[in-house]
């Protein structure tokens, strides 16, 4: 992709991509990812790429395989899976030059959505990888009280939205956005707010909140624009705090979150920062890229331009 002058946008470069490792997650989309994995590998080969298939027995094994592939001199590691699988590969790629490609095969595919990577056309996604256009990207790093770090690409969610994600992960039906909406309705029926302490680059905010999210990119939950001003290339994180309100008002929030217009409401606080600490009473659950990372407190920081992504 070029601008009107025929040059590439700032911050991108084009590299030759011929030999790639395909990191497969057959368990994505509640097991439906197996068929997609086969189709994705075929699409990559049809795009002229030499493909080495990698399947990890566990998340840690998959991370090790991705690291080994990067050290072997392959041109890219391609993730065939959802946002959680992509985050795993990005953690391995952190600080390395090997780019990550995405063949979307998850339930949300929110990082692919952020960069307009085709999620329903595997042949088109494979052509993006073969074209070799690379862009550097910031990542978020969430650290729990015991020092465990979790790298994420999209959003770290706490409070009600983390509970919704947990509920949605347990549901095999319906698919896509509808599953998150149904999970939200179930979550609101038994939800109690949290007393939060949120520290953003030293500034303390104390509020009774329904949820607190930290976005590196705009989307989570299959297309909800929770952090509509987030930019994964600015070295900052977008903080969205939603004050506790009645359950009926909470239900009204969700249609607006899909459009990103919730930030216009008086019960929503938005801030930006490089280091965010989230604490709550009682201790709220935290998810990042759709994967559980633990309970609060957590500290979230940004690692600027830490990874390289193959993009349209």
Image (spheres, rainbow, N blue to C red):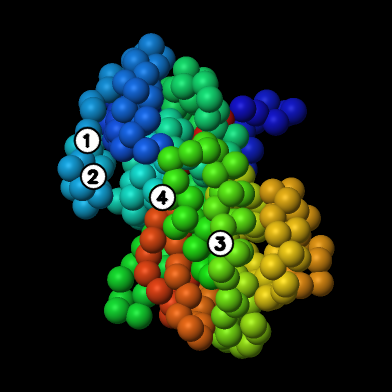
The reply to whether the C-beta atoms of the residues labelled 1 and 2 are less than 8 Å apart is yes
Mark 3 vs mark 2, foreground winner is 3
Residue positioned 52% across, 38% down in the render: 174
The residue wearing badge 1 is: 55
Residue annotated with mark 3: 187
Spatial CA span between label 2 and label 4: 23 Å
Q: Residue at x 61, y 64 (%)?
A: 188
Give the label, 1 or 4, closer to the camera. 4
Labels 3, 1: front one: 3
| Quarter that holds the C terminus | top right
State whether residue 15 is above or below residue 215. Answer: above
Mark sitting earlier along the chain (2/4): 2
- Report helix, strand or loop for mark 4: loop
On screen, residue 86 versus residue 251, left or right, reads left
> In the drawing, does residue 160 fall left or right of residue 242?
left
**Who is closer to the viewer here, 80 or 64?**
80
Total marks drawn? 4
- CB atoms at circles 3 and 4 under 8 Å apart? no
In 3D space, how far apart are the residues under numbered discs 3 and 2 (Cα atoms)?
Answer: 32 Å
Between 298 and 283, the residue placed more toward the observer is: 283
Lower sequence index among marks 3 and 4: 4
* Among numbered discs 1 and 4, the one appearing first in the sequence: 1
User: In x, y percent, where is residue 101?
Assistant: 41, 35
Residue, far front: 189
Q: Looking at the rendered structure, which numbered label has been put on residue 62? A: 2
Q: Which mark is residue 184?
A: none
Task: Give the secondary structure at mark 1.
Answer: strand
């Amino acid at each position: 992709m070029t601008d009107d002058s025929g040059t590439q946008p700032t911050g991108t470069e084009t590299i030759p991509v011929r030999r790639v490792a395909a990191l497969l997650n057959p368990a994505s989309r509640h097991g439906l990812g197996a068929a997609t994995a086969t189709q994705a590998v075929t699409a990559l080969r049809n795009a002229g790429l030499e493909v080495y298939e990698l399947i990890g027995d566990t998340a840690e094994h998959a991370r090790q395989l991705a690291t080994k592939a990067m050290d072997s001199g392959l041109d890219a590691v391609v993730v065939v899976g959802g946002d959680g699988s992509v985050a795993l590969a990005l953690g391995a790629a952190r600080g390395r030059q090997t780019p990550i490609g995405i063949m979307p095969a998850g339930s949300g595919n929110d990082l692919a959505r952020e960069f307009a990577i085709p999620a329903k056309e595997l042949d088109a996604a494979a052509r993006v990888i073969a074209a070799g256009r690379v862009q550097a990207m910031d990542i978020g790093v969430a650290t729990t009280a015991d020092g465990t770090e979790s790298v994420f690409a999209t959003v770290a969610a706490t409070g009600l939205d983390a509970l919704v994600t947990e509920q949605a992960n347990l549901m095999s039906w319906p698919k896509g956005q509808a599953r998150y909406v149904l999970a939200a309705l179930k979550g609101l029926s038994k939800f109690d707010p949290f007393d939060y302490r949120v520290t953003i680059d030293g500034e303390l905010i104390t509020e009774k909140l329904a949820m607190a999210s930290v976005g590196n990119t705009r989307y989570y939950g299959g297309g909800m624009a929770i952090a509509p001003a987030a930019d994964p290339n600015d070295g900052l994180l977008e903080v969205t705090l939603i004050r506790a309100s009645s359950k009926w008002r909470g239900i009204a929030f969700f249609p607006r979150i899909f459009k990103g217009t919730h930030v216009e409401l008086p019960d929503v606080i938005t801030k930006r920062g490089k280091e965010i600490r989230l604490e709550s009473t009682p201790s709220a659950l935290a998810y990042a890229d759709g994967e559980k990372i633990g309970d609060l407190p957590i500290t979230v920081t940004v690692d600027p331009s830490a990874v390289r992504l193959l993009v349209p």
